[in-house]
Amino acid sequence: MISVIVPCFNEEEAIPLFFAEMEKVKRKVSHGFEYIFINDGSKDRTLEVLRELARDNDFVRYISFSRNFGKEAALYAGLQAAKGELVTVMDVDLQDPPELLPQMVEMIETTDIDCVGTRRADRKGEPLIRNLFAKAFYHLINRISETEMVDGARDYRLMTRQMVDAVLELTEHNRFSKGLFSWVGFKTEYISFENQERIAGKTSWSFWELFNYSIDGIVNFSDVPLNIASFVGAFSCIASGIAMLFIIVRALIFGDPTSGWPSLVTIILFIGGVQLLCIGIIGKYIGKIFMETKKRPVYIVKETEKKLEQ
C-alpha cells in the first residue's frame, strides 16, 4: 500500500481537484492507496471538505490539528499515521505533479534505491528576489553543513518504510524536513520537473516566512554561525587591543591625545553592533535549545476520521 500524506492549510478549493487527479493516477499503479490529509488549523471549509471525502471513501483519512502548527508538524503527523510500505508526501495545490508517481514507484521497485525525490528544473514564475535568496540559501547551507541539500528539491518524494521509520526516530521539536530526509541517509535519486502553478487558492508562504524557515534550516544543521560569532569576537578584541596600544604609544611619544569624538562614537557603535550580532546568533541557538527542553508535543490532534465512525 502507498500512503499519500497531504498537508492542508486553507485549501478547500484545491482538495477536490487534487483528489480527482490522484484518482486518475491511482489507476496506473498496481497498489492500494490510503490518503492522509492533515488539516493544519485551517480557517476556511477545509475540514468540512475532508469530512465529506472521508465519509464517501474508506481509504481517505484525515487529522485535524487544534490550531496551526506549521507544515513541518503536519508532515511529522502524516508520517506517524502512515501505514503503507511506501510513503509519499505531496502538496495539495498540484505544484507536485501526481503523474510522476507511477515512475517513482517503478524506480523504487526495480532498483535498490530507498527514496525517489523530486526537484524543480527551474523557478520560472517566482519573484526574482525569492529566486535569488533560494539559490543563495542552498549554496550557503551546502558550504557550512555536512548534510547535503539539493537545490530545488521538494518535499514531494516516495520513501520506503525503512526510511520513514528512520525519519520518525528523529523526534526533535525544531524540524526541517528537507534536512532530515538527507540526514538519515539512504540511497536517493531525483526526478526533475518544470515548475507548476498552483491549481487554486493562494500560498500561505510569504517571503518573510520563507526567510525565517531558511534561518531555521541553517541553525538546525550547522554550528558555523557560532564559530563565526566566536571569530568576530576574537578579531574585534585583538583589533581593539592593537588600536589601544597604538593610541598609548602615540600619546607617550608625541604627546598627542586622541582627538575627535566622531571617530570615537563610530568605533563604539561598531563594537556594539558586533556584540549584538554575536549575541543574536548565540541567542538563536539558545532559543532552539529552550524549545527542545520544554518537551512540548510537535502538534495536538483535535479530530480524526474516526469521529465519523462514532
Image (cartoon, grey):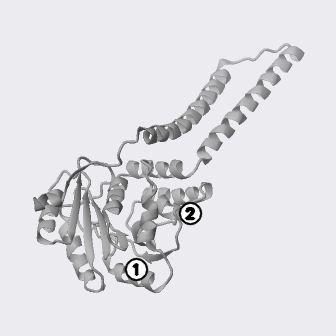
Where in the figure is residue 147, as x and y percent of width and height?
57, 60
Residue located farthest toward the front when viewing the structure as drawn: 310
Q: Is residue 85 left or right of residue 115?
A: left
- Between 257 and 102, the one lying in front of the other is 102
Residue bearing mark 2: 148
User: In the rendered image, which quarter contains the C terminus?
Assistant: bottom left
Q: In this view, does 144 lie to the left or right of 205?
A: right
* Res 17 quadrant in image: bottom left
Residue placed at 23% from the left, 82% from the top? 24
Kindly state the secondary structure of the residue where label 2 is placed: loop
Q: Which amino acid type is marked by label 1?
A: Met
Q: In this view, does 133 lie to the left or right of 95?
A: right
Mark 1 and mark 2 lie on one chain; the one further toward the N terminus is: 1
Separation of marks 1 and 2 at Cα, in angstroms: 21 Å
Q: Which amino acid type is marked by label 2?
A: Glu
Kindly state the secondary structure of the residue where label 1 is placed: helix
| 199 over 257 or under it: above or below | below
Where in the figure is residue 105, as x and y percent of width and height?
38, 81
Other-residue count near label 1 (Cα within 10 Å), few / some / many at <14 / 14–19 / ≥20: many
| 302 over 244 or under it: above or below | below
Residue located farthest toward the top when viewing the structure as drawn: 255
Residue 104's disc number: 1
